[in-house]
Amino acid sequence: MADLDDIKDGKDFHTDKPQTNTLFALKGCGALDWGMQSRLARIFNPKTRKTVMLAFDHGYFQGPTTGLERIDINITKKVFMGL
């Protein structure tokens, strides 16, 4: 076997270094990998930890909801109102 003949190096699990968990803006997300934290950072505001999510695909199944027939106009109105 390669490991018994000293041909293959053993793994170094760095047991001498303590595990660190870096803080992330969202509670409970500090242990997520970099990719998921990167995606969440683009969705959530890191200062306020808030986000705005709009469901705009429900009209495909149920038909347009009153007030959301022209979502491009309604979203623009909300953004300029500071919502």
Image (spheres, rainbow, N blue to C red):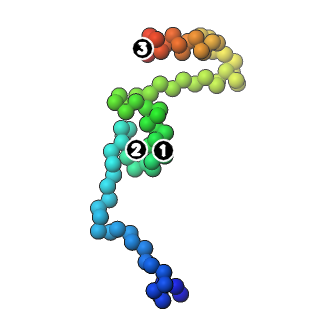
Q: Is residue 66 above or below residue 20?
A: above
Residue 37's quadrant in the figure? top left
Which residue: 47% across, 15% down? 79
Side (left or right) of 23 relative to 75 = left
The residue type indicated by label 1 comes to Met
Mark 3 crowd level (few <14, some 14–19, many ≥20, 10 Å Cα): few
Quick check: marks 1 and 2 in contact, CB under 8 Å?
Answer: yes
The residue type indicated by label 3 comes to Gly
Give the mark nearer the N terminus: 1 vs 2. Answer: 2
Element type at mark 3: loop
Give the mark nearer the N terminus: 3 vs 2. Answer: 2
Which residue: 53% across, 87% down? 1
Q: Position of residue 2 (x, y in %)?
A: 52, 85
* Residue receiving disc 2: 29
The residue type indicated by label 2 comes to Cys
User: Mark 1 to mark 2: distance in Å?
Assistant: 9 Å
Single out the mark in the foreground, 3 or 2. Answer: 3
* Residue receiving disc 3: 82
Mark 2 crowd level (few <14, some 14–19, many ≥20, 10 Å Cα): some
Element type at mark 2: loop
Single out the mark in the foreground, 1 or 2. Answer: 1
Q: Position of residue 18 (x, y in %)?
A: 29, 61
Which residue: 47% across, 25% down? 52
Residue 25's quadrant in the figure? top left
* Residue receiving disc 1: 36
Element type at mark 1: helix
Q: Is residue 12 above or below residue 31?
A: below
Q: Position of residue 35 (x, y in %)?
A: 49, 46
Q: Nearer the viewer, residue 2 or 81?
A: 2
